[in-house]
Amino acid sequence: MKKKIAVLAVQGAFIEHINALKRLNAECFEIRQKADLNPSIDGLILPGGESTVMGKLVDELGLFPRLYELITGGLPVFGTCAGLILLAKRISNGSHTYFAAMDITVKRNAYGRQLGSFAANGNFSGIGEFPMTFIRAPMIESAAENVEVLARENQRIVAARQDNMLVTAFHPELTHDLRVHEYFLKNF
């Protein structure tokens, strides 16, 4: 059965996720306003971008209550980079949290500014060696016992899962390797 995945499209790298999902034959659509929140979806992607701007737009567009309800109600959700920050319960270098659904502590811009962006290969549990693109990336400083760490880069946690949530500090949508998206579609 073809999964129907919603992609938050208010800011950031949403089109890259849509292209990856289409290559995997998943049905997908953009969420830009409240009317786009279809109750019959199988998953949600919160893309990379600027988390402060994304959080503000989600609130201003009236999307927050329904997205929060879907996420905390068990809808599978995949957050990359800024999406990881939106899902984090704690942000060590910021006072404002967003959905605060995943029991992790995140540090924003852990690898520095835009000039600190880089690519590396790392081992992703259940997938194997995977190319990782980091752009002003956060890192997971700590994870509760109920959070499974899926990948590390230089001993830093860069991918994890908890219940219905999958997060990566890197951007799998910016590579040609579809295995992380495939992992999300198959395991959530």
Image (spheres, grey):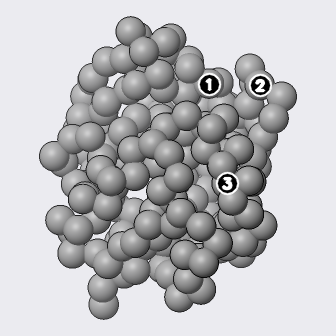
In whole angstroms, how far apart are the C-alphas of marks 2 and 3?
Answer: 18 Å
- Residue drawn at 39 percent across, 44 percent down: 13
Q: Amino acid at mark 3?
A: Val
Q: Decide: marks 3, 1 in contact (CB < 8 A)?
A: no
Q: Secondary structure at mark 2?
A: loop
Mark 3 highlights which residue?
A: 58
- Residue drawn at 31 percent across, 44 percent down: 172
Q: Residues within 10 Å of mark 3 (few under 14, many from 20)?
A: many
Above or below residue 187? Residue 122 is above
Q: Is residue 52 left or right of residue 4?
A: right
Earlier sequence position, callout 2 versus callout 3: 3
Q: Secondary structure at mark 3?
A: helix
- Residue drawn at 38 percent across, 26 percent down: 134
Mark 2 highlights which residue?
A: 94
In whole angstroms, how far apart are the C-alphas of marks 1 and 2?
Answer: 8 Å
Q: Decide: marks 1, 2 in contact (CB < 8 A)?
A: yes
Q: Amino acid at mark 2?
A: Gly
In whole angstroms, how far apart are the C-alphas of marks 3 and 1?
Answer: 19 Å
Mark 1 highlights which residue?
A: 108
Earlier sequence position, callout 3 versus callout 1: 3
